[in-house]
Amino acid sequence: FQLTETGKYAVDIGLITEIEAPLNNSKEPWEFKVGPLFQTEFGKLQLNGNVLFERKVGGDNDEHHITEMGYQWQVKYRLKSEFEFGAQGFGEMGEWDHWDNSNEQNHRFGPAVFGKLALGNKQAIKYNAAWLFGVSDAAPDNTFRMQLEYEF
């Protein structure tokens, strides 16, 4: 949800809400995610920061009934719409009101590329990809993440 008009204030503010339900397995929990989204720009530089709260409900395992806190950030230089570059970072802190020990937290960041390729007739392919390096004990050493969207 977009809560402020784009560009009206120094920081644009939004809200993410997500519900994930298991398809056929009642033993798996439902997942709920909510959190504020922040974005600002300085010329061709765009900065994003998100704080996310996630809770699993239901299923067989009672230990899922905690609210966990995570974050996402991104820096992007808007060279041209077909190719932009920057960095992304992701992390999980543990319970929102009682963070895990630092060696149990998951933090990773690294370089990223972004773009939108126009195909005509209001169609386009959007992409972003990042190579993330683990910077905490609980994080994998390397992660490759990619999103690909087809707009029509």
Image (cartoon, rainbow, N blue to C red):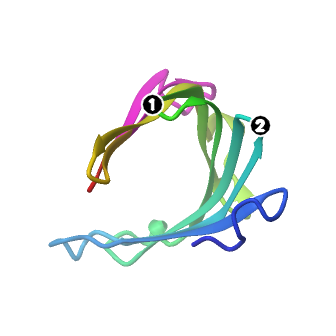
Where the C terminus falls, by quadrant?
bottom left
* Residue nearer the viewer, 59 or 83: 83
Give the number of marks: 2
Q: Residue at x 72, y 59 (%)?
A: 98
SS at badge 1: loop
The quadrant holding residue 109 is top right
Amino acid type indicated by mark 2 = Gly
Task: Point out residue 75 in the picture as x, y percentages from the top left corner.
Answer: 67, 35
Task: Point out residue 46 in the picture as x, y percentages from the top left corner.
Answer: 69, 40
Q: Is 145 included in the stretch rendered in magenta?
A: yes
Range covered by the magenta-colored residues = 127-148
Q: Residue at x 45, y 31 (%)?
A: 82
Task: Point out residue 139 in the picture as x, y percentages from the top left corner.
Answer: 53, 31
Where the N terminus falls, by quadrant?
bottom right
* Residue nearer the viewer, 75 or 117: 117
Look at mark 1 in the image and give the residue it sits on: 82
Outermost residue on the front side: it is 121
Residue 142 sits above or below residue 150 on the image: above
Which circle marks residue 9 in the picture? none
Residue 37 sits above or below residue 111 on the image: below
Outermost residue on the right side: it is 10
Which circle marks residue 43 in the picture? 2
- Which secondary structure class fits the magenta region best? strand
Residue 69 sits above or below residue 112 on the image: below
Q: Residue at x 61, y 60 (%)?
A: 52
Q: Is 152 included in the stretch rendered in magenta?
A: no
